[in-house]
Image: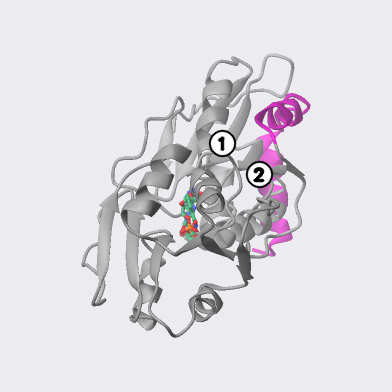
Amino acid sequence: MAASDIDTPSGSNARLRVLVLGGTGEARRLAEALAARPAFEASVSLAGRTRNPLALALPTRTGGFGGVEGLVAYLEAERIDAVIDATHPFAAIMSAHVAEAAQIAGVPLLALARAPWKPQPDDIWREAASLAEALTALGAAPRRVFAALGRNEVQALESAPQHHYLIRSIDPVEPRLALPSAAYIEARGPFAEPDERDLLTGHRIDAVLAKNSGGPETYAKIAAARALGIEVIMLARPARPAVESVATIEDALAWLERRQPRPHASRSHASTARRGV
Ligand code: NAP
């Protein structure tokens, strides 16, 4: 992070120090917008799950903070004035951590959260509250399943080994899963609907296992399944903390523009006092 050691006085010339929690296309686009606005001194944080993440327009730090305590310490050490949680809707742990940490540190927090997909008239969806429930919903009889899951989640497929799986991930799934029948593809979205139709047809897929991520970048597989009359087992989103939230980058920028840099020395003191340390 391009952290300056110089204390910026709170006033019209001070730049707002913004931390964006990333790992999504929205975070990448927000980073581009912030990089072009001199009023902000912003950086992005990534978990470090992807080996070669796409380049970001802002300074980037990588890796966990060390839970809520670590994140509080980071917000204070970097004198962050505002946080945007632009993590993926299924990154529930990070969102819970930042909600708690921002409250402890007294830092304003906004979630940039895309709306979930809604079933359209010709969609054949079955909703599942968990991956275990989704695997049960596939049934006992062998099927050919496109598992649109993250690398961290696919191991659960081993509990339903009767199916053939098509597994797509950005980085290779290594080691390969203990499954009698699986095909692996490495690819990074966004994906186009005609390509998704070809993929589903080419692999003779009869069920799609998907997370309700929302947004346009990974929707093509859902549209393709609809066009081909293929059933989608749709994982519902995990619960996230109730924090102020917007759905667009423009609204996130407008929220940031209303914020003021804060007097950091006193804030650090106050948050230490609040934690009773
Ligand atoms: P998670 O389960 O909510 O978080 C697990 C831990 O990973 C957190 O406690 C935190 O470690 C660390 N972490 C997560 N996001 C981070 C970030 N942006 N910066 C620094 N540390 C972070 O997260 P996840 O579901 O594994 O997602 C990890 C990343 O991949 C996120 O950035 C997310 O936006 C992106 N992503 C996730 C999905 C998905 O389906 N889950 C899909 C696409 C992209 P500490 O407790 O040590 O701070």
Residue 142, horizontal then vertical, whole percent: 38, 79
Q: Amino acid at mark 1?
A: Glu
Query: What residue appears at the point 47 percent right and 42 percent down from the top-left corner?
Result: 45
Residue 35 or residue 247, whichever sits in front: 247
Q: In this rendering, would 109 be left or right of 145? A: right
Residue at point 40%, 66% (across, down): 145
Please tell me which residue lies in front, 122 or 244: 122
Q: Quadrant of the N terminus?
A: top left
Name which residue lies at 35% across and 76% down: 163
The stretch in magenta equals 248-277
Q: How far, Cα to Cα, is label 2 from label 1?
A: 9 Å
**To which residue does mark 2 refer?**
114
| Quadrant where the C terminus is found in the figure | bottom right
Q: Amino acid at mark 2?
A: Arg
Q: Are marks 2 and 1 in contact (CB under 8 Å)?
A: yes
Q: Which mark is residue 26?
A: 1
